Amino acid sequence: MTILAEHIIHYFIITITMSLFSIFCIVLLGMSITLILGIAFFSYLKYIKRRYYPNWKFPDYISVGYAEYLYHKFIKKDLQN
């Protein structure tokens, strides 16, 4: 194998490795940006809740009967008033 061929093979190996590394870095950067934006968004929601609705009681669960009632009232619209 000539020296030129060895250099070409070496160049392609480095190029492929660097492109895989750069793809990995871009994916990692995208995930971290998404995480940071999610934390900022939910922190802002918590700020709004604390500032404007301090005594709001969020329900931890919803009963199945009430969920079915809301489904029929707003989604299927088959309930008569």
Image (tube, rainbow, N blue to C red):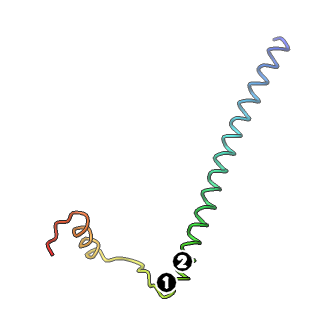
Q: Is residue 15 above or below residue 66?
A: above
Q: CA distance from mark 1 to mark 2?
A: 7 Å
Amino acid of disc 1: Tyr
Provide residue 10's location: percent of width, then percent of height. Answer: 79, 24
Quick check: 71 left or right of 1?
A: left
Provide residue 58's location: percent of width, then percent of height. Answer: 44, 81
State the SS at label 1.
loop
Q: Quadrant of residue 24?
A: top right
**Mark 1 touching mark 2, by CB under 8 A?**
yes
Amino acid of disc 2: Ile
Provide residue 48's location: percent of width, then percent of height. Answer: 54, 77
Q: Is residue 80 above or below residue 12?
A: below
Which residue is denoted by mark 1 in the rendering?
53
Identified at 31% across, 77% down, the residue is: 63
Point out which mark residue 48 bears.
Answer: 2
Name the image quarter holding the N terminus: top right
Provide residue 46's location: percent of width, then percent of height. Answer: 55, 76
